[in-house]
Image (cartoon, helix red, strand yellow):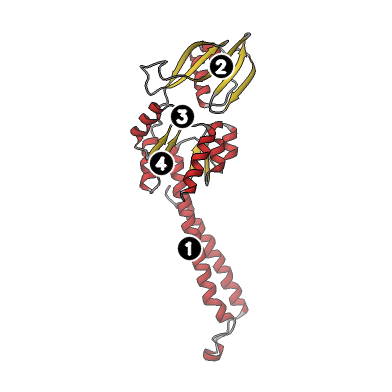
Amino acid sequence: MLALAASVEAASEHPLARAIVDHAAEQGIEPRAAENFSATAGSGVTAEVGGVRVEIGHASAQAIPEHPTATLVGITVDGRYAGTLALGDTLKPTTPDAIKELHRLGLKVVMVTGDREATARSLSEELGLDDYHASVTPAKKQELVRNYQSDGQSVVFAGDGINDAPALAAADVGIAMGTGTDVAMHSAGLVLVKGDLAALVRAVHLSRATLRNIKQNLFWAFAYNFAGLPVAAGLLYPFTGWLLNPMLAGAAMSLSSISVVANALRLRRVRL
């Protein structure tokens, strides 16, 4: 069963597929050639291996009751149930702290997953998330993004799979994990190379620091021109006899540009 599953999943980019293939390799099982491979987003994959039709997709929660929080993958061979694989999605050590920091920054964190209710609820409670949505299809993920947007909220969606691509494209900011699929990375506006939520926290800090810097530069640019242009235009000449030498005006404009660039370069020292 594991050999058939690995043979089919070897052609898939899904993280669960890679987990199955890696586990098979640890057991000394090499994938065989699979033909007529097809994937249905949010449903599963099918292919022919050694003359038999293998289908892999979601399994019922009753299949392995002793694993209430595992991701269950059912395997069917030529239309007959062959077995179920239980996959445990372990948290990265940096994830709990990343969620806490996102909350500290005033952001609402919601998990949207195609996994079953028990798994999503357990993970949500462990991380202290604001909300979660389980058993969600790719189209439903996109719909959820648009629902949040219709409520007047700006949505940042982070994902790594082909099932996340529609939501990544619909979000105000789509963030793909560098360890995910190519289609997810092409649908997103930002890619976290290591696929770590700690990098998402750094991205938020950097974006806020950049926006502050832009506002500072705009303020000083307008303030400088507001003060300098009247003098250059001779507004004070009737009262004080002051005129601005063109050479000094040119030097002042150069210094203004230098000050803006110097202020922007301070972003290199921002603590992320």
| Gap between marks 1 and 2 measured at Cα | 58 Å
Amino acid identity at mark 3: Ser
Q: Residue 214 location in percent, x, y?
A: 51, 59
Viewer-nearest residue: 52 or 211: 52
| Residue that badge 3 annotates | 135
Q: Earlier in the sequence, mark 1 or mark 2?
A: 2
Dot 3: within a 10 Å radius of its alpha carbon, few (fewer than 14), some, or many (20 or more) residues? some
On the question of residue 110 being in view, the answer is: yes
Q: Earlier in the sequence, mark 4 or mark 2?
A: 2
Residue at left offset 38%, top offset 49%: 106
| Residue that badge 2 annotates | 55
Q: Residue furthest right?
A: 36
Residue at left offset 40%, top offset 30%: 120
| Residue that badge 1 annotates | 216
Q: Could you say which quadrant of the image residue 60 lies in? A: top left
Q: Are marks 4 and 2 in contact (CB under 8 Å)?
A: no
Q: Could you say which quadrant of the image residue 46 lies in? A: top right
Q: Do the residues labelled 3 and 2 touch (CB within 8 Å)?
A: no
Which mark lies nearer to you, 1 or 2?
2
Residue 109 is tagged as 4
| Gap between marks 1 and 3 measured at Cα | 45 Å
Amino acid identity at mark 4: Val
**SS of the residue under disc 1:** helix
